[in-house]
Image: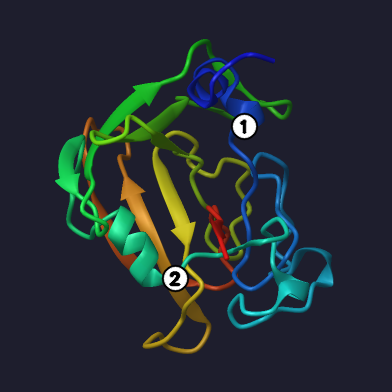
């Protein structure tokens, strides 16, 4: 409707934040709804991790990124806010923003509508990652720590113990800055996805 992607996150954060996924499973979990700790919403089968299109939550022609791809865009140890050189040589400026209005979901979950904007100094193009939170397995709370952190799955679990896969974390937790981290996450936990073209 004539608005930019940033306009959407700034003025309608809760409608653009998306859902959370268990690793290897196709269907999302709406993060502010209640969760009975079944460790498998909808009794989905899992692809360990995401390799087959039958389990891919991404649109056709897209896939879950690898560890190397996420590290190229979000280098481990990089402080946000800050400026850095991405794996493709682009200079990226990462800034933290707060959406307009007060966040209250239909079930009363609250939070601060934070998002991080990664802008290419070379092209002016940008990518926005909402701090949509995340949920550990068997978590019964409705609140996935909205506005405090972003947790993004990768498509890999090489080098992880059984039941874990790799994820990238941006933990603000009420602070004004954070450092990007790569961490093993239980596959039954819930985290966000950003898909890339095949």
Which residue corresponds to mark 1?
Answer: 16
Q: Quadrant of residue 48?
A: bottom right
Q: Secondary structure at mark 2?
A: loop
Of the image marks 1 and 2, the number of the one nearer the N terminus: 1
Residue found 48% across the figure and 45% down from its top: 133
Residue found 24% across the figure and 53% down from its top: 86
Residue most toward the front?
Answer: 123
* Nearer-the-camera pick, 56 or 87: 87
Count of numbered marks:
2
* Nearer-the-camera pick, 5 or 171: 5
Q: Is residue 184 visible?
A: no
Q: Is residue 95 left or right of residue 165?
A: left
* Nearer-the-camera pick, 81 or 52: 52
How far across and how far down the image is residue 17, in percent?
A: 58, 36
Q: Is residue 134 visible?
A: yes
Q: Quadrant of residue 142?
A: top right
Q: Is residue 36 left or right of residue 104?
A: right
How far across and how far down the image is residue 18, in percent?
A: 63, 41
Q: Is residue 159 placed above or below 31 in the rendered structure?
A: below
Q: Distance from label 1 to label 2 (Cα)?
A: 24 Å
Residue most toward the right?
Answer: 42
Q: Quadrant of the N terminus?
A: top right
Q: Is residue 34 left or right of residue 184?
A: right
The image's mark for residue 66 is: 2
Q: Quadrant of the C terminus?
A: bottom right
How far across and how far down the image is residue 137, in percent?
A: 58, 65
Q: Specify few, some or many for label 1: CA neighbours under 10 Å numbering under 14, 14-19, or 20 or more.
A: some
Q: Is residue 9 placed above or below 191 in the rendered structure?
A: above
**Badge 1 vs badge 2, beta-carbon distance below 8 Å:** no
Residue most toward the top?
Answer: 101
């Amino acid at each position: 409707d004539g608005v930019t992607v940033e306009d959407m996150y700034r003025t309608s954060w809760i409608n653009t934040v998306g859902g959370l996924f268990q690793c290897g499973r196709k269907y999302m979990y709406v993060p502010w709804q209640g969760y009975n700790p079944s460790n498998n919403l909808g009794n989905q089968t899992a692809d360990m991790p995401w390799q087959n299109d039958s389990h891919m939550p991404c649109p056709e022609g897209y896939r879950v990124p690898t560890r190397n791809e996420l590290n190229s865009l979000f280098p481990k140890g990089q402080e946000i806010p800050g400026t850095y050189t991405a794996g493709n040589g682009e200079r990226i400026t990462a800034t933290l923003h707060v959406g307009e209005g007060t966040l209250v979901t239909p079930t009363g979950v609250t939070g601060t509508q934070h998002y991080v904007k990664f802008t290419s100094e070379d092209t002016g193009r940008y990518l926005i990652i909402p701090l949509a939170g995340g949920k550990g397995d068997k978590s019964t709370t409705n609140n996935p720590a909205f506005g405090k952190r972003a947790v993004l799955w990768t498509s890999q679990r090489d080098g992880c113990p059984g039941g874990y896969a790799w994820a990238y974390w941006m933990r603000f937790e009420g602070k004004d800055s954070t450092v990007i981290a790569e961490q093993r996450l239980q596959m039954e936990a819930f985290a966000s996805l950003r898909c890339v073209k095949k």
